[in-house]
Amino acid sequence: MKSKFYAAFLFVFALFADDAYGQAKKWTLQECVEYALKNNISIKLTELDARLANVSRKDAKSAFLPTAQIQGSHSWNIGLNQNITTGLLENQTTQFTSVGLNMGVDIYNGLQNQNRLRRANLAAISAQYQTVKMQEDVALNVANAYLQVLFNKENLKVQEQQLAFDTRQMQRVGELVEGGAVPRGDLLDVKATVAADNQKKIAAENALLISKLSLAQLMQLEDFQNFDTEDGNYDVKDEPILLEQPATIYNKAKEQRTELKIARTNVEVAEKDVKIAKGAYQPVISGFYSLTTRAAYSDRIVGFAQSTTQPTSVVGFVDGTNQLVLQNNYQPILGRYLPILDQFDNNKGHSFGVGVNVPIFNGFAVRNNVERTKVELERSQITLEQRELDLERNVYTAYTDAQGALKAYDAAVSAAEARTEALTYAQERYEVGLINVFDLNQAQTLSVNAQSEVLRTKYDYIFRIKILEFYFGIPISQISQK
């Protein structure tokens, strides 16, 4: 009974497993792009650069805050040193503790802090643009890889159809050979053609697998073994973007393209660098405050008492009588040192003020730095001009390529239709013995090549359109289907 139940369980599990496998997820272009934007390593690296730029902006803000530091020390004096209580040199061990608080604030430094903050804000914006630029590049690469998978899928279908056709042709030629209608050599030629078709099919399968692997790696997809894209009948038509003039596309791209935003921001950053460098010509005014205190661990004088060993001493004589003038001798009474906190309170001292640092001569370091920043500013301006020229050239090239790709596709479709008719005609002529199998194979090869060219030009046209739409500001997410 248990064995029957176990066998039934395995059967049901196998049914569900087959159903789950049959319903394996197939990715759309939009899903591939979204996944890549979340997981691509290059995007993650640019996001780290953006985070570092935000940290630099925090540094620039912190420059406006005052600086403060607490310092302290504890020392031991061993051997012959002055007794701070009696003022005498003695062999002793004493301890001292000192504590201090120092504070400073920039009042004026040629507006360098303000310009550094503005520069840091611009640098953070530039870093964000770099992240967006990387996302756009990854999306475009994903779209290209996705279309390559679609092309290889359809190309594999063409090769499979070709193999099936030649296999049927081989069976037909075999029948004709048995009937004595055609020589046996025709059958051998057809068999060779079928073997070549198998090789082409295997090559198409490998190309499809490699293109899937490339797309999965671009997306940073871990489970690439079961990765597959959505099947669809993708249409080729006159896209609305081709109705736009290249100048219109360029003007819109000039406003929206991220590489130009990056170049413009870099020019502004370079301008702030020049202002920061020039700020070093001006004087620096700063304020400071200091609090210090100390404590000693030696005995202190708590009172005085007359000396028992020498109560008095002679300090002089009275004129005329020579009477001695005596003075009482007192010696200090030593007691334990005051509590440390009490000493800190009694010995504290304050100092504050304003300092001015006026640059007079520093070996032309400031002047050279200003000249250096001006050169970088000019470099940034030239780079912006070059980016605008590159964009204009790329837009016009993309527009021309899209139009050319559409014409190439139309020509490939016409050629494929003609080759299909030629193949049908060649088959009819072969059936009646007007041509040999070699001529038939030539017609078949030309027909297959024409179909492959239709696929190649179709997906080339779709990708060219996506590039043109990309410059026009249309996101790369969908492909038109019939």
Image: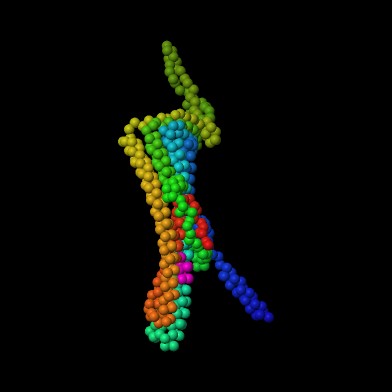
Closest to the observer, 156 or 11? 156
Residue 395: % across, % down: 41, 51
Residue drawn at 48 percent across, 50 percent down: 473
Residue drawn at 47 percent across, 42 percent down: 121
Closest to the observer, 406 or 52? 406
Residue drawn at 40 percent across, 36 percent down: 275
Examine the rendered structure and indicate whether residue 445 appears above or below residue 254. Answer: below
Tally of marks: 0
Residue drawn at 37 percent across, 41 percent down: 377
Residue 88: % across, % down: 43, 31
Residue 202 in view here: no
**Residue 354 in magenta stretch:** no
Residue 323 sits in quarter: top left
Residue 165 in view here: yes
**Residue 153 in magenta stretch:** yes
Q: Which residues are magenta?
A: 151-158
**Please, which residue is most extreme toward the right here?**
1
**Please, which residue is most extreme toward the left here?**
363
- Look at the image and tell me in which quarter the N terminus lies: bottom right
Residue 10 sits in quarter: bottom right
Examine the rendered structure and indicate whether residue 72 appears above or below residue 325. Answer: below
Q: Is residue 432 left or right of residue 480?
A: left
Examine the rendered structure and indicate whether residue 283 appears above or below residue 204. Answer: above
Q: Main secondary structure of the magenta part?
A: helix
Examine the rendered structure and indicate whether residue 338 appears above or below residue 471. Answer: above
**Please, which residue is most extreme toward the top here?**
320
Residue 364: % across, % down: 31, 36
Residue 178: % across, % down: 44, 88
